[in-house]
Amino acid sequence: MPEIIAGVAIPDTELARAATALVRRVADDTLFHHSRRVFLWGSLKAAARGLAVDPELAYVGGLFHDLGLTAEYGSKERRFELDGAEAARDFLLEHGRSEVDARNVWLAVALHTTPEIPHHLAPEVAVVTLGVETDVLGLDLGEIPEDRRAEVVAAHPRPDFKNRILRAFHDGMAHRPDTTFGTMNDDVLAHFDPTFTRTNFVDIIKSNPWPE
């Protein structure tokens, strides 16, 4: 029997179990519980919107979306979202999912910090952003009934989550600050480091080598 939380069935397949084991091994409690909540919130909101989502793909997208913040999967020179996206794509292909499926989950993970765009793509892309926006930003939290919220948080607690997730973001990006240009991630680095200097888009345009 699959585990059911707040009316959402956790996929009980070999692929899903392997995904759980992988993320449980490399992520701390904060990221693991956050990632499971992302799947649950996204599934609840997708169902309310009438989106038909492949639960296995939604589960991998939710679990892998912050994998690039971990020591094992984080790189030194590219955005953490891309690290997680590449890991998710490789994992799905290794477990027999199609290139199309793997690409949609790649997009879900790569774009989960990019506002609006994921909502206009495949349901398997949108579902991850719906979950992230709910758990991190509290967007449209009222759409989820209080009893469902309580059940999810009982299964996957969020103690001091706001501070802990900000610290996880910082720790996963501080060694590659240039990758935060053009994203909301530079807000995190600036929050923890008052000496952090953001790359300025206007300055790049005005100082580029094109003649006037």
Image: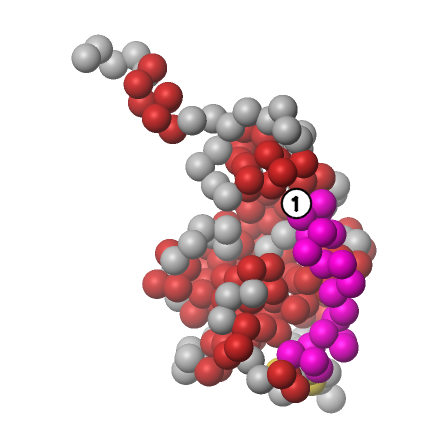
Residue 212, relative to residue 29: is it above or below? above
User: Disc count in the image?
Assistant: 1
How is the rendered protein coloured? secondary structure
Circle 1: element type:
helix
- Can you give x and y, in whole percent of width and height, for residue 198 in the image? 51, 28
Q: Say if the magenta span includes residue 160.
A: yes
Which image quadrant: the C terminus?
top left
Residue 5, horizontal then vertical, whole percent: 69, 82
Quadrant where the N terminus sits is bottom right
For the record, the magenta segment spans 149-168
Confirm whether the magenta stretch covers residue 78: no
Q: Examine the image and state in which quarter residue 126 appears.
A: bottom left
Above or below — where is 6 with respect to 131?
Answer: below
Residue placed at 79% from the left, 59% from the top?
A: 29
Residue matched to label 1: 169
Residue 86 or residue 127, whichever sits in front: 127
* Horizontal and vertical percent position of residue 76: 64, 31
Work out whether 100 lies above or below 204. below
* Side of 147 where 46 appears, left or right: left
User: What is the quadrant of residue 21 in the picture?
Assistant: bottom right
Residue found at x 46% / y 82%? 48
Report the predominant secondary structure element of the magenta stretch.
helix
Q: Is residue 12 visible?
A: no
**Residue 36 can be seen in this image:** yes
Locate residue 127 relative to residue 145 in the image: left or right.
left
Which residue: 66% across, 31% down?
193
Residue 130 point in image, percent of width and height: 50, 66
Q: Is 146 in front, or is 24?
A: 146
Q: Amino acid at mark 1?
A: Phe
The residue lying toward the viewer, choosing from 161 and 183, is: 161
